[in-house]
Image: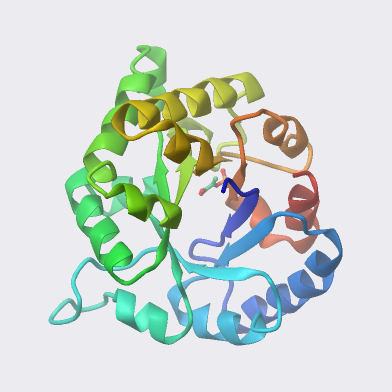
Amino acid sequence: MRKKIVAGNWKMNKNLAETGELLSNLKAKLGKVSEAEVIVAPTFTNLYRATEELKSSSVKVAAQNMHQAENGAYTGEISADMLKSIDVNTVILGHSERRAYFGETDELLSQKVNTALNHGMTIIFCFGEELQDRKSNNHFAVVESQLKNGLFHIDTSQWKNIILAYEPVWAIGTGETASPEQAQEMHAFIRSTIVKAYNETIANDVSILYGGSVKPNNAEEIFAKPDVDGGLIGGASLDVESFSAIVSAI
Ligand code: PEP
């Protein structure tokens, strides 16, 4: 069943003390405003603190990344089992910053997808075109190929563990948002691509989040579009007032 979801990607921000403060403020604030499912993704070192702090809350905790292997000689990496052992059952995969700065390809992401699903995790699968793709009217083809190559190998039964996040790269952290119409157009295209590869039920049931400079002043009109089921929020998720304002815009 399609859900309304607002997820905050905290990226490489907030030390332990700052994380604790943001979490307790969020808990106090979101108890009152939240109709959506709310997910926060602190950095690795603060995940345990987050799951402990949010035990009694409906806010879920996600990791920002994980490695595809089960374990072994992968210095600096974190496995699905490690995440699950601290009650982190959701992971963001394919964020454009991982693709751009850490060389994550569709092929690698398809392996990470398999590992996360084998562990019963929920995946927030991110994808989106760059500015030159949109300028050359290639944005639909880019999005379709990211989905086909990174995700569309999964079984029908595994879609219940998938949340999609369409994030046009030109709108991330730039202050430039896709218009509500551009977001709706792409989200409808994504659903039609899923219908072709799978079926109507899967296309209708999957939540598709929009990400890219969502702020309290634009969230409502973006979330009002019929194929937009919420947002993946970067910068504005670091402030309790703006994040809770976005959550209440759903
Ligand atoms: C993101 O990084 O996923 C994101 C959407 O960032 P921002 O909201 O800051 O554009």
Please tell me in which quadrant of the rendered image residue 150 appears.
top left
Residue placed furthest toward the right: 32
Residue at 62 percent of width and 51 percent of height: 5
Residue at 55 percent of width and 71 percent of height: 61
Residue 236 position in % (x across, y down): 67, 52
Please tell me in which quadrant of the rendered image residue 174 appears.
top right
Residue placed furthest toward the top: 136
Residue 213 position in % (x across, y down): 61, 40
Residue 188 seen in the current view:
yes
The vertical placement of 199 against 189, above or below, is: below
Residue 218 position in % (x across, y down): 74, 34
Please give left or right for residue 245 compared with residue 222 in the image.
right
Please give left or right for residue 139 compared with residue 30 in the image.
left
Please give left or right for residue 70 compared with residue 93 in the image.
left
Residue 94 position in % (x across, y down): 35, 50
Q: Nearer the viewer, residue 192 or 224?
A: 192
Residue 129 seen in the current view:
no
